[in-house]
Amino acid sequence: MGHQDHRRGLDRSRGRRHRRGGAHLTVLVAALVAVVLAVSGCGGDSGEDTAPQPTPVRLDAPPTNLTWASFNGMSIPQADQGPRTPDQLAPRGFEQSPAGSALAAINATIRMSVATDDQWPQIVRTLLAPGPARDAFIASRIQLSTTDLVPAGQAPLVLGWQVTAFTPEQAGVDVFTQLPDQSLAVNHTTVVWTGFGDWGLLLPDANAAAPAVQTISAVPAGAVRIKGD
């Protein structure tokens, strides 16, 4: 009996040592996992701290490889940012960027303004964003008849633009022009990214409190200048 009691005591002692050893091993493994997670950046919110931040969009980014196209006596700026789909009447395909939105706004504004009777339906359908203002413009334009081009020396000159707000879905663009009498004007425009994968000019509400076109004394210093000093 004494021998058996001695063996049972040894077994209990070994069991306690095994349990203590297992507890120590569990603590060691937990500590090791914590260290690995901290080093690898996989634990907690560290992934949010190390995630790359998006590059800010430059609203004053200038166009590249600027050229000019003539349409009904007006000069329209073109560049790498658009248009990329050549068409004599309603070119499209503008980059989804501040410069692309500005070029699209100028392109659509000029072409719809000086289009002749046989040109404006395609221009409106292709370059203008759908909406009540476009419907109202169509109803008014049908009542008019224009077949003449802009006379030489009477065309406003596009000096540049300023993108006042930009998201990939919508942009506000102030277009600056010089009139034949040397006075300056700004045209407040808005373009939206349409389901066709391009910018469309969103015509202003006819009942808006502020006029879309205003006289100014100077082009703002922060504007993107594309012509003139």
Image (cartoon, grey):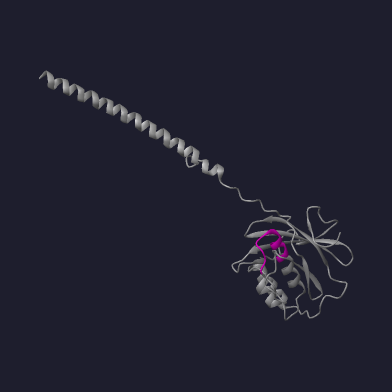
Which residue occupies 78% across, 68% down? 67
- Quadrant containing the N terminus is top left
Does residue 97 show up magenta in the picture? yes
Which residue occupies 72% across, 62% down? 102
Front-lying residue, 129 or 163: 163
Front-lying residue, 89 or 1: 1
Which residue occupies 35% across, 31% down? 25
- The answer to which image quadrant residue 50 occupies is top right
Does residue 24 show up magenta in the picture? no
- The answer to which image quadrant residue 226 occupies is bottom right
Q: How many marks?
A: 0
Compared with 44, 100 (above or below) is: below
Q: Tell me residue 124's x, y (percent).
A: 68, 73
Which residue occupies 80% across, 70% down? 75
- The answer to which image quadrant residue 101 occupies is bottom right
Compared with 208, 196 (above or below) is: below
Compared with 7, 146 (above or below) is: below
Front-lying residue, 186 or 68: 68
Q: Tell me residue 5's x, y (percent).
A: 14, 20
Q: In the shown orientation, is residue 21 left or right of residue 30?
A: left
Front-lying residue, 18 or 51: 18
Compared with 84, 148 (above or below) is: below
The boundaries of the magenta stretch are 93-104
User: Which residue is at the far top?
Assistant: 2
Q: Tell me residue 207's x, y (percent).
A: 71, 63
User: Which residue is at the far right?
Assistant: 181
User: Which residue is at the far front?
Assistant: 3
- Quadrant containing the C terminus is bottom right
Q: Tell me residue 70's x, y (percent).
A: 79, 73
